Image: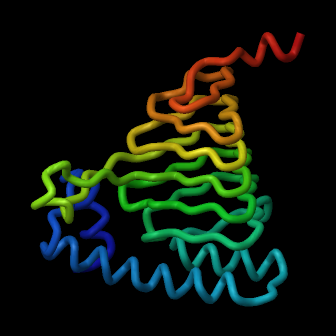
């Protein structure tokens, strides 16, 4: 199955049945992503070389303002879209089969997990994966060790505090934190 067809099918269906043709095609892309990440994480590279290798992993040409501190891993790679002037700190893990959209001027702290998959609750069907995107709107700041779960959109300018587990959408111009993440403040309160 060609990559374009696979991405289209994953987005349209929102589910991957374990052992299916779609699952097998996904595993092939994932195997290549793991190989590319292993290469990226085991060398000493310039910022430009890192950007070139991330472009290969994502299949997207990244702008000159993109910056990544290694190590970085992704489960799939080809379902990540990265805006302009994005910074991703070291230790991040992206599970992007369900799609990860990162807006412009986003900051992503150390060890952040962006997860787009849930497995079936029935133990007999745990190989079935349900896909929902993670969307980071423009100018979001995701603190270190935060986890963003499937289906979550973080609104423009929002801040996710370090160590948070985000299970629901985050409103624009807010600060959330905790497990599960809850509203802590607004940006207006902090900028007075």
**Residue 180's spot in the image, x, y percent?**
51, 30
Q: Quadrant of residue 119?
A: bottom left
Which residue: 73% across, 77% down?
A: 50
Which is more toward the observer, 65 or 17?
17
The C terminus - image quarter: top right
Q: Quadrant of residue 174?
A: top right
Q: Reply above or below: 136 against 189.
A: below
Q: Is residue 54 left or right of residue 17?
A: right
Which residue: 52% across, 61% down?
A: 94
Which residue: 79% across, 59% down?
A: 65
Given the current orientation, which residue lies at the most extreme front position?
123
Q: Is residue 147 left or right of residue 167?
A: right
Report the number of discs: 0
Which is more toward the observer, 82 or 117?
117
**Residue 137's spot in the image, x, y percent?**
59, 37
Can residue 78 be seen here? The reply is yes
**Residue 42's spot in the image, x, y percent?**
70, 88
Q: Is residue 56 left or right of residue 174?
A: left
Colouring mode (rainbow / by chain / secondary structure / one colour): rainbow
The N terminus - image quarter: bottom left
Q: Reply above or below: 139 against 173.
A: below
Can residue 12 be seen here? The reply is no
Q: Reply above or below: 161 against 191.
A: below
Q: Quadrant of residue 168?
A: top left
**Residue 41's spot in the image, x, y percent?**
68, 82
């Amino acid at each position: 199955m060609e990559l374009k067809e696979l991405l289209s099918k994953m987005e349209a269906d929102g589910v991957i049945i374990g052992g299916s043709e779609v699952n097998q095609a996904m595993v092939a892309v994932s195997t290549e992503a793991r190989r590319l990440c292993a290469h990226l994480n085991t060398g000493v590279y310039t910022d430009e070389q890192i950007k070139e290798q991330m472009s290969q992993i994502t299949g997207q040409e990244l702008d000159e303002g993109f910056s990544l501190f290694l190590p970085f891993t992704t489960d799939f790679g080809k379902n990540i879209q990265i805006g302009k002037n994005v910074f991703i700190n070291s230790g991040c893990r992206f599970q992007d089969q369900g799609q990860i959209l990162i807006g412009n001027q986003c900051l992503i702290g150390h060890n952040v997990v962006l997860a787009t998959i849930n497995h079936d609750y029935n133990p007999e069907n745990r190989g079935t994966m349900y896909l929902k995107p993670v969307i980071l709107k423009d100018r979001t700041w995701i603190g270190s060790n935060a986890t963003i779960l499937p289906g979550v959109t973080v609104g423009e300018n929002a801040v996710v505090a370090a160590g948070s587990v985000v299970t629901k959408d985050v409103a624009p111009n807010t600060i959330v934190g905790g497990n599960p993440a809850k509203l802590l403040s607004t940006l207006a309160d902090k900028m007075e």
